[in-house]
Image (cartoon, rainbow, N blue to C red):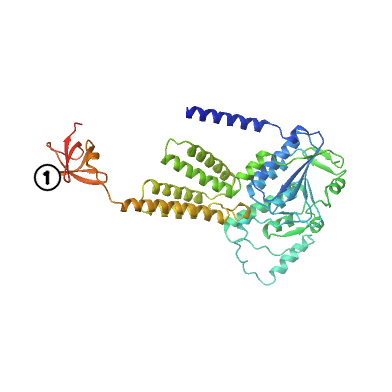
Amino acid sequence: MYAQTLKFSLTIALLLAVLAISLPTPAQEETPPGALWMLQLDGAVGPSTADYLVRGIEGAAEARAAAVLIRIDTPGGLDSSMRDMIAGVLASPIPVICYVAPGGARAASAGTFLMYSCHIAAMAPATNLGAATPVSIGTPMTPSPPREPGQDKANSEMGSESGGTQQFEPVIQPGSALERKVINDAVAYIRSLAELRGRNADWAERAVREGASLSAGSALELGVIDLMAADTEELLNALAGREIKIGAQVIRLDLAGAPRVIHDPDWRSEFLAVITNPNVAYMLMIIGLYGLVFEFSNPGFGLPGILGLTCLLVALYAFQVLPISYAGLGLMFLGIGLIATEAMMPSFGVFGIGGLIAFVVGSIMLMDTDIPAYQIALPVILSLSTVTGLLVFGILGLALRAYRRPRHFSRDAVIDQSLIIEQSDDNRALVRYEGELWLVRCADSLVVGDRVRVKAVDGLTLVVDKQEK
């Protein structure tokens, strides 16, 4: 009965999920051709924002929109998500306009790459972009190597002779080969985007190598962006008549009077944003692991196993798109396994304390990034580690209490027990009962491995009969 109810519930849940996915969003229901789709990138770039922007651009293309306008205010984020968004922009058959607004907004790090990829890049006054050095390797820069006298001057003169209007500082390269590879890859990527859109590639390289930033006015002056506009209306009016080439097609923009479709994140993007929050994914994994441990230690209950497996699968999906350290994840699994072993086979703290240490170290190592928005908050780690520690010491206390409790032997309980001979020598045989070795007496000769049945207790000797194999 329980299995049938569970199967029916899972079937209903699956059907509801499929129905929810197939339902059109409000933007899909009322989308006139030739409309301007308006998307918004706020906060850190991650899997949920990439999913939202890519599907928004694809939806606009399917709805035969005139263009997509992305309003940007981001400090940057994950490289993999940034590349997904840029791939969506580059594959778009309709113009994509990036607009850093309102005043005080920024397009830092990953936002700078996204700006360079868009067909039109615009900024509002009092905004900025840049600081595009990969964060994970942005800190461990080594001191620059010794320079010959006059080398800095020669570099400046060489930059001036090349036609540049700005004197560039000598670049400090990262110390390790891996850091140089990542930096050079990012430089090549942003330069290719700059060359594709006809924007300032030299400053783009500075933004990656040196973390350079620009205000909106300076960005326009240096050819990093295409125009400045105080608001959306001014931007659309300034774009009137501008031609954009996409493939072999030339598109003439006329968006001031176009219908506007505000495409907000749907339930899928919001759900993805919740589960890809590192703190939420971390707690889901812990709930999942403890649910499975409880189910295995108390089989047949059902609910902890179902809940635990569901939470664990959702957490593993989130970890798939997050920058995790597999060494940290392995240490966490090892820690939970040792704690579970301590609960089932008490070792007076050896497994439990070792598991707690592995759990804490793995939790700290879990997120393999220096981006603050994608790190696990230390209070969350400390809270769950404290709960785990209380569990370990609770198990240890129960084990010690059981060890110190006086043992009571019941003569009636041992009668008719079937035991196996563990030791046998010189007419002396021993069996193990409740963790202790007992001397046995039997009318037949006994050897190690013989099975006997207890028929009486004589002092500290068990009187047994030999059973046939």
Numbered marks: total: 1
Residue 445 at what x, y percent from top left? 13, 38
Q: Quadrant of the C terminus?
A: top left
Question: Outermost residue, bottom direction?
Answer: 149
x 63%, y 42%: residue: 272
Q: Is residue 382 left or right of residue 224?
A: left
Instruction: Reply above or below: 263 against 331.
Output: above
- Is residue 125 in view? yes
Q: Quadrant of residue 221?
A: bottom right
In the foreground, 212 or 358:
358
x 67%, y 62%: residue: 171
Residue 100 at what x, y percent from top left? 77, 51
Q: Secondary structure at mark 1?
A: loop
Dot 1, how many residues are within 10 Å of its Cα: few (below 14), some (14-19), or many (20+)? few
Identify the residue position indicated by label 1 in the image.
426
Q: Is residue 49 left or right of residue 384?
A: right
Q: Is residue 268 left or right of residue 334?
A: right
Residue 297 at what x, y percent from top left? 41, 41
